[in-house]
Each structure stands twice: as structure tokens, then as C-alpha cells.
């Protein structure tokens, strides 16, 4: 007996349910959505829904995890370039480039998660992911040097700054291109806030 081939319809069906759910969330609050709404919108049976998800909370959790996993996969695919980047003002940090390109390509689902689904805690979890990735960029050699700012304060400040800027950019309709945003954040990171505001810091 040969090995059964995987059913290629399964990923498509699961994505169809996800898309239907996110579409519903644009129209009504999460608490007002029941499984029947999702199955009717996706045109699938309840048994098909439960073959993929335990309930709507599991569906939401899987969506959040999938988005964060996609972003992490992009970072991993460019890890060498990202970790070897040296600060400059005339080009984008590949870390910022990856983030803004990914956000732009998935803007509709990110906006639903951020604006319509506070239950997902997505912004906080995105901030945690950024915090973790930033920590990887601080190698042992740099840690041997004297740090002008404690590492925990540095990572917290930068992760909230990056995520907050990215979320605001999405909610404001992405009026700047992903590449422009990546360059501006790279420039601001290299210059520092005071220099960017034309302030001269006293030593």
C-alpha cells in the first residue's frame, strides 16, 4: 500500500476560514461572533471548522502565532545580513526593511488584529518579538564594552519605539512607502533623537 498523499485542500480551507473570520471582525466585535457566523461566511461545515480549530479563541491565537512566525522566518532568512549591519544614514537597516515590507504586504490582517481585536494582545506580542530580535543584535563583543545606557532600558525603549511607529504608520494608511520608513528609522537610530531635533547634547 502506498503512502497517502497529503490533502492539498487542507491549507486552503484553513486559510479560507481565517480570511472569513478576519472579514467578520471588520464588521462586528469579537464577542459578537459565533462559530455559525464563521462557518457560514467561510461556507464550510462545523465539522470542518473543528478539524482545524478548537474554538474562535484558538482560531485567533493561531492567526497571531502564524503572523509572528512569518515575521520571525523573514528575520531568520536574512539573519546574517541583519546581524552584520553597521549603522548608516544613507540606506535602510535590513531589520527595518524586513519589518515594514512584511507589514505592508499583510496590512489588512494586521490592521484587524491591531484595531479590531484587542483580545489578541497582538501589539504587545509584536513588541516582545521586536525586543527579542533586538537582543540578538547585541553580540558578546559589544557587551564587553561599557554601555552608556543599561541594556534593559535600551531594549525596552527601542522595542516600544519601533513597534509604536510601525503601528501608527499602518493605522494612518501607510502614507510613506515601506522603504522610506525603513530609511527614516535607520537614520533616526543612527543619529539619535536629540541630533534629529537639532539639539546639541551636553556631555
Image: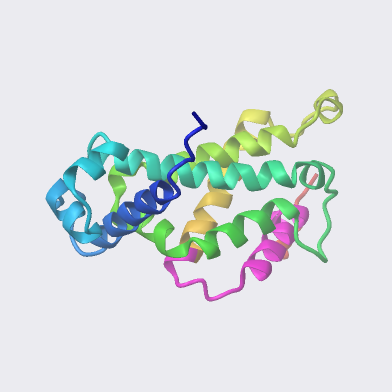
Say left or right for 131 vs 87: left
Residue at the image point whose x is 25% and y is 34% from the top: 54
Residue drawn at x 34%, y 56% as measured from the top left = 16
The image shows a total of numbered marks equal to 0
- Residue 142 falls left or right of residue 54: right
Location of residue 103 in the rendering, given as x and y in whole percent from the top left corner: 53, 59
Q: Quadrant of residue 191?
A: bottom right
Is the residue 200 above or below the residue 77 in the image?
below
In the figure, is residue 138 to the left or right of 156? right
Q: Work out which residue is located at the far front of the displayed protein and give it.
A: 1
Q: Nearer the viewer, residue 142 or 132?
A: 132
Q: Is residue 45 above or below residue 143?
A: below
54 w.r.t. 144: above or below: below
Q: Which contiguous range is marked in magenta?
A: 170-194
Report the quarter where the C terminus lies. Answer: top right
The answer to which image quadrant residue 195 occupies is bottom right
Q: Position of residue 101 (x, y in %)?
A: 61, 62
Question: What residue is shown at x 25% (from left), y 58% (from top)?
Answer: 42
Residue at x 15% of width, y 51% of height = 33
In the image, residue 49 above or below residue 191: above
From the top left corner, tell me how far across and down residue 143 is, in percent: 80, 26
> Is 21 covered by the magenta stretch?
no
User: Which of the pair 163/37 is nearer the observer?
Assistant: 37
Q: Is residue 172 visible?
A: yes
Specify whether residue 186 is painted magenta: yes
Question: What's the magenta bit mostly, secondary-structure-wise?
Answer: helix
Q: Position of residue 36 (x, y in %)?
A: 13, 50
In front of the other: 198 or 60: 60
User: Can residue 197 be seen by looking at this rendering?
Assistant: no
Amino acid at each position: 500500500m502506498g503512502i497517502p498523499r497529503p490533502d492539498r485542500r487542507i491549507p486552503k480551507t484553513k486559510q479560507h476560514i481565517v480570511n472569513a473570520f478576519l472579514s467578520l471582525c471588520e464588521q462586528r466585535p469579537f464577542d459578537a461572533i459565533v462559530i455559525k457566523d464563521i462557518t457560514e461566511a467561510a461556507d464550510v461545515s462545523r465539522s470542518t471548522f473543528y478539524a482545524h480549530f478548537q474554538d474562535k479563541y484558538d482560531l485567533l491565537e493561531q492567526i497571531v502565532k502564524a503572523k509572528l512566525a512569518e515575521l520571525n522566518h523573514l528575520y531568520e532568512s536574512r539573519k546574517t545580513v541583519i546581524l552584520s549591519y553597521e549603522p548608516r544614514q544613507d540606506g535602510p537597516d535590513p531589520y527595518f526593511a524586513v519589518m515594514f515590507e512584511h507589514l505592508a504586504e499583510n496590512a489588512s490582517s494586521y490592521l484587524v488584529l491591531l484595531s479590531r481585536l484587542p483580545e489578541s494582545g497582538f501589539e504587545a506580542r509584536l513588541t516582545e518579538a521586536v525586543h527579542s530580535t533586538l537582543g540578538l543584535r547585541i553580540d558578546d563583543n559589544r557587551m564587553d564594552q561599557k554601555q552608556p545606557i543599561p541594556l534593559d532600558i535600551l531594549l525596552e525603549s527601542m522595542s516600544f519605539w519601533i513597534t509604536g511607529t510601525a503601528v501608527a504608520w499602518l493605522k494612518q494608511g501607510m502614507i510613506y512607502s515601506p522603504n522610506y520608513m525603513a530609511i527614516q528609522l535607520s537614520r533616526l537610530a543612527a543619529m539619535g533623537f536629540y541630533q534629529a531635533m537639532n539639539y546639541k547634547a551636553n556631555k
